[in-house]
Amino acid sequence: MRPDVRGTVPSPCIKLCVVDGQSGLCAGCGRTLAEIGGWLRFSDEQRRAVMAELPSRLAALSDAMAVP
């Protein structure tokens, strides 16, 4: 994770930008396109709220992608 110019909550971007068509989530970081696009405008509180959701989003996305 790298720190952003604004705010103290770093971006979760891992440079694996692939959006899953079913969920609308990035397979790399778990954010929606709106969250990715708005990240620099988000307050630290908004960023922390998104960050709290990412582990469960990525787990669900991984489970969905593993099903044949």
Image (cartoon, grey):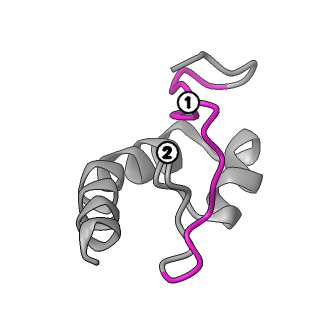
Marks 1 and 2 close (CB-CB < 8 Å): yes
Of residue 49 and residue 35, the one placed in the foreground of this image is 35
Q: Residue at x 61, y 16 (%)?
A: 3
Residue 39: percent from left, percent from top: 68, 45
Residue 1: percent from left, percent from top: 51, 20
Q: Quadrant of the C terminus?
A: bottom left
Residue 11: in magenta span: yes
Mark 2 lies on a secondary structure that is loop
The reply, left or right, for residue 37 in relation to residue 39 is right
| Residue density around tag 1, few if under 14, some if 14–19, many if 20 or more, within 10 Å | few
Of residue 46 and residue 14, the one placed in the foreground of this image is 14
- Residue on which disc 1 sits: 14
Give the dominant element type of the magenta stretch: helix, strand or loop: loop
The reply, left or right, for residue 21 in relation to residue 9 is right
Residue 30: percent from left, percent from top: 46, 54
- Residue on which disc 2 sits: 29
Q: Residue at x 66, y 46 (%)?
A: 17
Mark 1 lies on a secondary structure that is loop
Q: Amino acid at mark 2?
A: Cys
Q: Name which of mark 1 and mark 2 comes first in the sequence.
A: 1
> What number is the disc on residue 28?
none
Instruction: For marks 1 and 2, give the CA distance.
Output: 6 Å
- The span picked out in magenta is 7-22
